[in-house]
Amino acid sequence: MARKKGLVPIRCEIAATAGKLFEMAGLSPEKCSKDQREVLAAFAFGFALTPHEEKFEQLGEVEALGDVSALATGLLLDVFRFSLKEAAELTFPLVDASAPLSTNRAINLVIQRGVTAYGQWQDGRIDLVRKNLKEILETVKTFPRPEHQPEALFSTDPKYSLRETREKLYAKHLGKLWEVNREIVEHKPQVDVYVLDPECDEIPYKMVTGGMSDYPMKVPEGVPFRRTELVLYVKKPKPFYYDLLRHLAHIPHDQEMWYAHGTSMPNGPSDDEARPIFEGSELDCFLFLDSIVEEDENLHEKLVLEGDPVNLLWVIPITSVECRFANRRSKDGDSWMGLREFLDILERKHHPVVLEEMRKSYVRRKLK
């Protein structure tokens, strides 16, 4: 059974609150047009999130934005039954319009009317709630997008069909979608980061890249996969994790290199200049391994893009000493000896799947 985490009860409560809103108004989102559902979603967003404002005020700006985005996506999926693609496209403009200084005034007004309606509901003025909803549907006919919405969200993106295929498979096989963090800066490829809830006790959240596999890596002969995505298993998504995954996902395409099972590299320009990945941590290198999580390790059997299977690599932060240990060769030239021995150490130490930023090195002696 899935255990309850920070946003789970809030997401359920928001869905229930939004459901009450439409029950009071005698409306059914399923019977409305797509434009009406989008406008209603903005109204419900303001209505249902209002009782949780104090919680978000206690968080840092970036962390609060991540939580609100995740809850907006949940509202669009749970209550309005938008498709995964539609929910991903609407989350950004919805959260953008909720900002006090948003230039998307039309939708900001709809959200604020939702906030007002929540107060009216608390006061027992159901008639005013219904009046608010009726006026909004009569005056706001469409959901305008902000001008700075990332172009990669729309079907004009030449890789859009790959993105759509990948997103559907992620939601079906990897876990319940919590958030899609779109890359706004122009980059080839555009790398989004998906936060998924596998609904199990051992792994609170998965953070998976999407877009790295739009293009094949330049791999040497014998490397089994030309396309890959990255996964990080975490206790709670942090802004830094999004940036870290996106940075790692761009490296093979920017530097014409490749990742595969067993690839390792320093967090810096060279082994001697490796920098701590996390402040105060010994971990200053990366190791990429095939995932050991059942539904993730066989992704390549389900996801095929332009004829290439897509592998999912698990990002494991390690220390410089561990990195040198894993890269050792045997006297007869066996390049896999060090990795095999390091994997044995991980197993003996019961290395956790979920990231531990302050983990101490399993290998203590320095290697030349």
Image: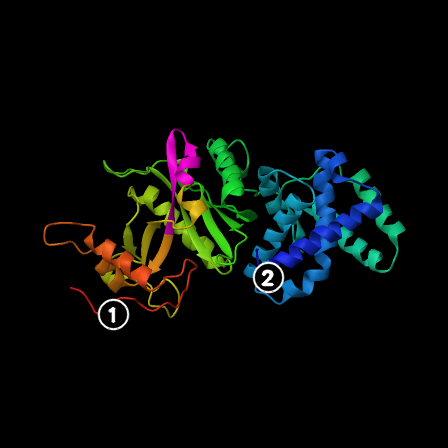
**Nearer to us in this view, 217 or 263:** 263
Q: Would you call the spot at circle 2 few (<14 residues within 10 Å), some (14-19), or many (20 or more)?
A: few
The quadrant in which the N terminus is found is bottom right
Would residue 188 be visible to someone looking at this image? no
In which quadrant will I find the C terminus?
bottom left
Percent across and percent down for residue 290 are 35, 48
Is any part of residue 8 visible from this angle? yes
The quadrant where residue 37 appears: top right
Q: Which colour assignment does the render follow?
A: rainbow
Q: Is residue 329 left or right of residue 181?
A: left
Instruction: Indicate left or right for 263 with 163 as reference.
Output: left
Q: Position of residue 274 (x, y in %)?
A: 28, 61
Which residues are the magenta region?
Answer: 299-314
| Nearer-N-terminus badge (2/1) | 2
Q: Residue at 74% of width from left, 43% of height from top?
A: 40
Whole-percent x, y for residue 108 in the image: 70, 49
* Residue identifier under label 2: 6
Tell which residue pokes out farthest to the top in this image.
Answer: 307
Q: Is residue 300 magenta-colored?
A: yes
- Name the secondary structure under disc 2: loop
Q: CA distance from mark 2 to mark 1?
A: 36 Å
Mark 1 neighbour class, 10 Å CA radius: few under 14, some 14 to 19, many 20 or more: few
Residue for badge 1: 364
Q: Position of residue 251 (x, y in %)?
A: 34, 47
Left/right of residue 37 with respect to residue 213 in the rendered view: right
| Amino acid on which disc 2 is placed | Gly
The number of discs equals: 2
- Tell whether 301 sits left or right of 257: right
- Given residues 220 and 359, the one toward you in this image is 359
Q: Residue at x 81, y 41 (%)?
A: 27
